[in-house]
């Protein structure tokens, strides 16, 4: 028995020793693995290669920064663009075609513009640089954030003369209901005016709907667009929608209407005086000023209109229908209030050829947003439903 016990104890001791060695080996493997993982950033670098090691350390730090930024809370501007994670904007369908009406549950798209070119040739370099910087900021701010259930709304209507805007003016000035305000073109001149007359009353809940009308006496869009884009961004931050509208007219029809309405007798002189009428009005708020080249004027007009939610060519009726729907108006068709009753001028072939030559940019602009049949080629975005209590 004593011999048996001694043999058994020896065997057990040997087994324990082997187990201990096995455990030690496993622990060693784990420690080596951890050590290798810990020193993984230095793989590929030779011993003493400080430049390589520094570069890899920099890459690791950048990767860590990306990981950290991806997990942090969104910035204030992005958090203001949605009410909650459940209301984040949906992607635009890849099949969206020009002229389609974008439903209210589809966010708009980032409208990529170019730097502004509206500076006068005799303006100093510092002022010109400042204006370009403002326009670039307006373009970068124009991320069309979706406010799916807005508590308030601003409708900005840009009225180019002889495009049926007076009919819109007639309608919106006669709306009478609590929380509604119409702001005439001559009432606002500065960004401070927008804050006082638009942003603060909406933020306080004093108002729910505002029509901001742009026509004669309004600040020219070539200068005022950055202020409007900042207003749009601020409104999104308090859960309010900003929707912008503009209408274009076929150029030859437009000039004939303008000649008749203004009792012009010298057709040729007038055609030369107001060349590129609609483009000049978009940039300068007057058809009698042009302080940049034709190519720059066309690019600037396109860039400005690229910030609008709805740009419709006449006679396409859908732009006004969307505008009326945004205001919950029963009648969705425009009542033509200020139609020129006078006979349209009978332009000669030479005068038409002259007009086509000096105003060819108008055709470029019009057919950027219209088919040959007068149907919109760019998406038309509906207003999301307004929360009414």
Image: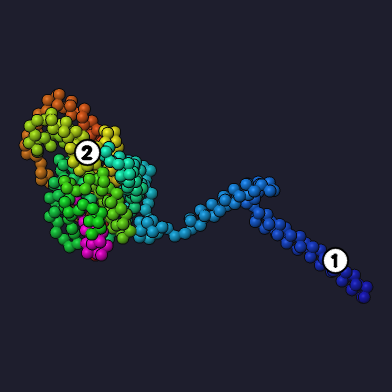
**Place of residue 300 in the rendered image (x, y in percent of width and height, measured from the top left):** 29, 39
Q: Earlier in the sequence, mark 2 or mark 1?
A: 1
* Residue density around tag 1, few if under 14, some if 14–19, many if 20 or more, within 10 Å: few
Numbered tag placed on residue 14 in the rendering = 1
**Place of residue 201 in the rendered image (x, y in percent of width and height, measured from the top left):** 23, 62
- Quarter-wise, where is residue 93 in the image? top left
The residue furthest bottom is 2
Q: Name the residue under label 2.
A: 280
**Horizontal side, residue 158 vs residue 116: left or right:** left
Q: Residue at the location (27% across, 62% down)?
A: 203
Q: Please say if the residues under marks 2 and 1 sit with CB atoms less than 8 Å apart.
A: no
The residue furthest top is 350
Residue situated in front as seen by the camera: 327 or 198:
198
24 drawn magenta: no
199 drawn magenta: yes
Q: Residue at the location (23% across, 50% down)?
A: 156
Quadrant for the C terminus, please: bottom left
* Secondary structure beneath label 2: helix
Task: Read off the magenta span.
Answer: 197-214
Position of 121 relative to 47 (above/below): above
* Secondary structure beneath label 1: helix
Between circles 2 and 1, the one closer to the viewer is 2
- Quarter-wise, where is residue 373 in the image? top left
């Amino acid at each position: 028995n004593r011999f048996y016990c001694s043999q058994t104890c020896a065997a057990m001791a040997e087994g324990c020793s082997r187990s201990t060695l096995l455990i030690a080996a496993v622990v060693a493997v784990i420690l080596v693995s951890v050590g290798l993982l810990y020193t993984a950033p230095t793989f590929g670098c030779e011993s003493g290669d400080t430049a390589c090691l520094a570069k890899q350390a920099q890459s690791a730090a950048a990767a860590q920064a990306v990981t950290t930024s991806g997990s942090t809370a969104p910035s204030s501007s992005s958090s203001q663009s949605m009410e909650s994670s459940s209301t984040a904007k949906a992607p635009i369908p890849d099949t969206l075609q020009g002229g389609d009406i974008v439903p209210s549950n589809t966010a708009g798209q980032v409208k990529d513009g170019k730097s502004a070119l509206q500076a006068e040739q005799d303006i100093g370099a510092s002022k010109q640089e400042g204006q370009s910087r403002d326009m670039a900021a307006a373009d970068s701010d124009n991320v069309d954030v979706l406010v799916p259930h807005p508590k308030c709304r601003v409708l900005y209507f840009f009225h180019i003369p002889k495009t049926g805007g007076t009919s819109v003016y007639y309608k919106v000035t006669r709306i009478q209901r609590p929380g509604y305000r119409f702001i005439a073109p001559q009432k606002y001149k500065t960004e401070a005016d927008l804050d006082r007359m638009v942003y603060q009353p909406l933020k306080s809940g004093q108002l729910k709907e505002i029509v901001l009308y742009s026509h004669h006496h309004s600040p020219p869009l070539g200068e005022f667009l950055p202020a409007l884009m900042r207003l749009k961004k601020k409104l999104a931050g308090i859960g309010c929608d900003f929707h912008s509208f503009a209408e274009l007219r076929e150029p030859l029809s437009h000039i004939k209407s303008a000649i008749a309405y203004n009792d012009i007798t010298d057709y040729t002189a007038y055609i030369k005086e107001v060349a590129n009428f609609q483009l000049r009005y978009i940039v300068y708020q007057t058809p009698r000023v042009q302080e940049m080249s034709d190519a720059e004027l066309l690019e600037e007009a396109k860039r400005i209109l690229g910030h609008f939610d709805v740009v419709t060519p006449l006679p396409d009726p859908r732009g006004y229908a969307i505008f009326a729907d945004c205001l919950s108006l029963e009648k969705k068709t425009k009542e033509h209030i200020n139609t020129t009753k006078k006979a349209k001028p009978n332009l000669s072939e030479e005068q038409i050829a002259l007009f086509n030559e000096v105003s060819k940019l108008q055709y470029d602009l019009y057919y950027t947003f219209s088919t040959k049949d007068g149907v919109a080629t760019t998406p038309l975005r509906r207003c999301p439903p307004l929360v009414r209590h």
